[in-house]
């Protein structure tokens, strides 16, 4: 048909009012449907949709055409296109073009199972020889395989949850509460900036980073390959997570451990002078540096966790190490002092805390306060013997642990100038 004739027909159709319609099926078959096909060849999709809505939308679905569905889809009207494609498929279930296009619409709507069934059928009918169908089949196959892996990971999350502690579960529940009330949470997905995890989990930044990585590996959350307009990473929340949490019984451990773990953070470390002393340890000789660093780390860790007995014992051990380092640095290779009118001689590396304190007090090596602080640690270090605690009925409390910790801290800062 010439473009002039096509334009005249189009003008005629547009002049009709919707209620006018067409008198009989013959007019539809001889005028409207051929016109739609001619317009399709000219890629006039908007005109096709206009004609359909004016003349055929209320007619029998038997007049639905592939070209009409394609035109709706091309104009972004997927719901209308889907309805027509579904109708066409009802009459011709082996139409591979319809199967392919309808699969794409289902895919865009996130209906992956339906999309996969459609493209799989189209692929089988074309025996993999249609390049368009083949390309869409391979693309969807990759998505389906990835989804299977995600589903498996999400399903296996229950096994990981059954091994979690009450503390870990509580952090996960707190996180989910914050996710659900976030205005950006939609369809199981949410953008979360790295800094925001600590707020949503209720922990410090380092623990938040660690928990985030663990939760990703365990399938509680999944990193998505998309970001919002501000470049913030999207995450998918395991849709079964809340249900799984209700089913599992977390490992019941000492609640004090988790209170202590929460206390291991930058603020607490700064408060107890950890970083300042760490800088001084850097200047310790190679022979002693790793030992001093190890013992100090263990002392601080036990103190922050609230491990009273460990703090006291570590305090005495750390102090012995510091005194050994100090003496060797000063070329003092043996320790001698008088007790009950008897002279005691010991090699440096065989001396204990009591030997060092007796020696320093007698030689007046340090200010009196340093020896006195050391005595505090020596006295309470006797708690290493359970019999003393039981026999003397003296309570081993955090106050004693704090006295030892801060006494040793003072001495360390004095010795490691």
Image: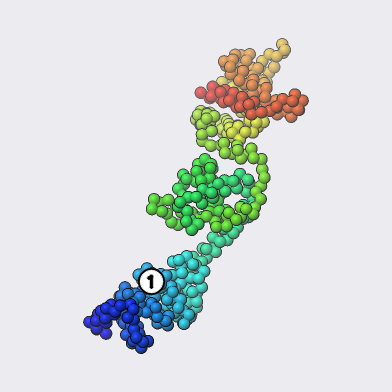
Q: How many marks?
A: 1
Q: Secondary structure at mark 1?
A: helix
Residue 371: give x, y in percent of width and height: 61, 18
Residue shown at the point (59%, 46%) measured from the top left: 170
The answer to whether residue 327 is visible is yes
**Quadrant assignment, res 105:** bottom left
- Asked whether 193 or 67 is in front, the reply is 67
**Quadrant assignment, res 46:** bottom left
- Residue 207 to residue 24: above or below: above
Which residue occupies the extreme front position in the image? 19
- Asked whether 90 or 335 is in front, the reply is 90
Residue 71: give x, y in percent of width and height: 36, 74
Q: Locate the N terminus by quadrant.
A: bottom left
The answer to whether residue 127 is visible is no
- Residue 302 to residue 46: above or below: above
Residue indicated by mark 1: 73
Residue shown at the point (66%, 28%) measured from the top left: 397
Residue shown at the point (41%, 69%) measured from the top left: 78
- Asked whether 69 or 322 is in front, the reply is 69
- Asked whether 206 or 258 is in front, the reply is 258
Q: Is residue 277 left or right of residue 73?
A: right
Which residue occupies the extreme left position in the image? 4
């Amino acid at each position: 048909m010439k473009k002039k004739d096509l334009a005249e027909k189009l003008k005629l159709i547009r002049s009709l009012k919707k209620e006018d319609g067409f008198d009989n099926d013959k007019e539809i078959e001889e005028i409207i449907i051929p016109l739609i096909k001619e317009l399709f060849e000219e890629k006039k999709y908007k005109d096709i949709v206009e004609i359909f809505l004016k003349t055929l939308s209320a007619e029998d679905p038997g007049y639905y055409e592939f070209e009409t569905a394609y035109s709706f889809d091309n104009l972004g009207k997927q719901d209308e296109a889907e309805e027509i494609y579904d109708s066409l498929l009802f009459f011709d279930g082996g139409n591979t073009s319809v199967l392919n296009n309808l699969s794409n619409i289902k895919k865009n709507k996130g209906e992956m199972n339906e999309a996969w069934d459609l493209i799989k059928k189209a692929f089988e009918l074309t025996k993999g020889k249609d390049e368009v169908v083949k390309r869409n089949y391979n693309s969807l196959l990759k998505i389906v395989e990835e989804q299977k892996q995600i589903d498996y990971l999400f399903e296996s999350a229950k096994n990981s949850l059954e091994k979690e502690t009450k503390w870990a579960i509580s952090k996960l529940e707190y996180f989910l509460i914050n996710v659900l009330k976030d205005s950006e949470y939609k369809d199981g997905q949410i953008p979360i900036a790295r800094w925001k995890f600590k707020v949503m989990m209720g922990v410090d930044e380092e623990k938040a980073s660690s928990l985030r990585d663990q939760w990703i590996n365990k399938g509680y959350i999944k990193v998505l390959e998309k970001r919002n307009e501000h470049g913030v990473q999207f995450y998918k929340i395991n849709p079964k997570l809340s249900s799984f949490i209700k089913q599992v019984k977390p490992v019941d451990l000492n609640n004090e451990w988790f209170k202590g773990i929460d206390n291991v953070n930058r603020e607490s470390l700064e408060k107890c002078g950890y970083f300042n002393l760490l800088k001084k340890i850097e200047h310790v000789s190679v022979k002693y540096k790793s030992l001093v660093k190890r013992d100090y780390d263990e002392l601080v860790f036990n103190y922050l966790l609230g491990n009273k007995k460990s703090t006291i014992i570590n305090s005495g051990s750390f102090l012995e190490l510091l005194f050994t380092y100090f003496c060797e640095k000063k070329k003092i290779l043996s320790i001698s002092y008088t007790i009950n009118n008897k002279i005691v001689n010991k090699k440096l590396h065989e001396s204990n805390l009591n030997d060092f304190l007796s020696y320093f007090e007698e030689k007046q090596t340090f200010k009196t306060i340093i020896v006195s602080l050391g005595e505090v640690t020596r006295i309470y270090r006797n708690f290493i013997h359970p019999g003393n605690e039981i026999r003397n009925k003296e309570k081993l409390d955090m106050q004693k642990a704090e006295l030892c910790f801060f006494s040793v801290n003072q001495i360390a800062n004095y010795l490691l100038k």
